[in-house]
Image (cartoon, rainbow, N blue to C red):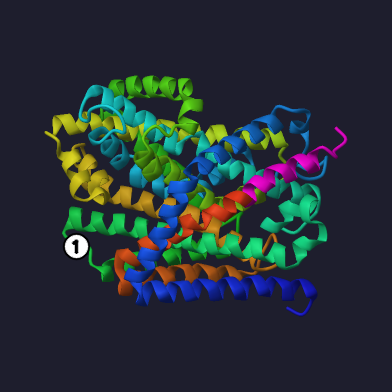
Amino acid sequence: MENEQGSKSNIVLYVSAAIALLFIAFSIFMTEQMGKAANAVLSFLTTNFGWLYLLSVGIFILTCLGVAFSRFGKIKLGQDDEKPEFTDFQWFTMLFGGGMGISLIFWSIAEPMVHYMSPPVGQGGTPEAMLLAMQLVFNDFGLHVWFIYTICGLALAYFQFRKGLPCLISSAFYPLLGERIHGPIGKSIDILAVFATIFGVATSLGLGSSQIAAGLQYVWGIPATPAMTAVVIAIMTVIFTLATVSGLHKAMQMVADIKIWLSIASMVFIFLFGGAVFQLNLFTHTLGMYMQNFVGQTLWMANIEWTTAWPIFYRAWYIAWAAFVGQYIARISRGRTIREFILTATFLPVGFSFVWLAIYGGAAFQLDVLSGGAIQAAVKNDYTTALYVTLQQLPFYMITAPLAMLLIIASFAGSANSATFVLSMLTSGGDMNPSKKLRGFWGIAQGSVTIMLILVGGTAAIKTLQTASIAAAFPFMLIMLAMCYSIYKALSEEKV
């Protein structure tokens, strides 16, 4: 690019790419040493600052709800006469697909079983442990997740569409930094966001491909070798890259629609054949317990070791994703009011997630009893097979198993689409419609990086990247706390 903005955007592109490549090279050729270093940093942060992760999420929740129900809730994320760019259904499918997908499928059966067998309090393997397990899963995939995404998305949408600033994470700090957002401080914020996004997508691609490879082996006996996993990654990369290049209104929307309809069909099938009444009873009880104990669960630290391994880990993981998910949901929410944005971006995806978890988790518990503990055994042996073992207890297994793999691909593609689009925005000076060449570059780059990691460093290298991205969430959490003040400062100057 020849203009000043272009040169500045190139700085973010080149520096973030160089840092990522350097870290990846070390992860490939010094896997053990990098793994130890990343684990040591993450352990230090979660052990000594776990309380701050929990408190920060509490602040995000209070900020979002306070703004939504205040007089500022009717302010448009855009000009006063702007209309929404997408229909309500399109908006919802892209909201859900951009921020939650692969992890919901990956853990919807495995995590309830893990907590059931080893609860943080009480005895495992009891009816009480089952109810507690579902409550804990709701806590990990519930409102806390979406308030993290929403506070980031609110700041970005407000300053970009209301104030006309570039579509960059650094734009959210204009009330605090002024024109310095265009300088080294602002660029550092954007580079950190790019860094976290690259590694977040790479680790998710690794997790998703491993679950598909495990399914190929479990269903058809095709060995889940690193080479086969690399082939799966390559296919998934082609799909989400082509979708991202096509743009928000074409294949990206189609992927989101496919994902939501496959998800609904899957839930209906498991609901009908996996013990509907049991699932309904479990959903009702778990929802009540979740609502009753929401504040306590937000700040619960009675079992430090367990809290560090699960809630704090999840909070850090979602904060690591907040940069790209927040930017993505901001991009698709132009023309909505602040109140509409906050309430829709939190409660609707959460409601869908809770129904999903109750159906999948409830069916797993019910079918585990009927199968003599087959699902517990699968989780103990290899939790990537838990979904297929569960489906095996139901009719039409040879049809539902391949459809489950297709759902995993669509779910990952939804998240990868949004991440790739946002990476292109962040590295093009905040262009709302970045070039197809740049979108293609980031799509291919993310897939290639993951393939190299799998082939050379194996799952250990993927785990190192995941640990590094979560450790990078700590400084970004501090950035998000500053976002809360920046939002308040800017809104207080609005004449409403």
Position of 404 relative to 368 (above/below) = below
Choose top left, top right, bottom left or bottom right for residue 284: top left
Q: How far across and how far down the image is residue 94, in percent? A: 55, 46
Q: How far across and how far down the image is residue 467, in percent? A: 42, 58
Task: Count the labels in the image.
Answer: 1
The residue carrying mark 1 is 222
Q: How far across and how far down the image is residue 104, in percent? A: 40, 43
Position of 131 relative to 407 (above/below) = above
Position of 304 relative to 15 (above/below) = above
- Residue 219 visible in the picture: yes
Front one among 247 and 412: 412
- The reply to whether the magenta stretch includes residue 468 is no
Q: What residue appears at the point 44 percent right and 25 percent down from the top-left corner?
A: 290
Which residue in the rendered view is the most extreme toward the left?
A: 372
Q: What residue appears at the point 28 percent right and 33 percent down from the top-left corner?
A: 119
Front one among 361 and 59: 59
Q: How far across and how far down the image is residue 366, in percent? A: 22, 28
Magenta stretch, main secondary structure class: helix
- The reply to whether the magenta stretch includes residue 491 is yes
Q: What residue appears at the point 59 percent right and 38 percent down from the top-left corner?
A: 345
Callout 1 crowding tier (Cα within 10 Å): few <14, some 14–19, many ≥20 = few
Q: Which residues are magenta?
A: 479-496
What SS does tag 1 mark?
loop
- Left or right: 159, with 453 as reference point: right
Front one among 8 and 337: 8
Which amino acid lies under the numbered mark 1 shown in the image of this protein? Ile
Front one among 264 and 431: 431
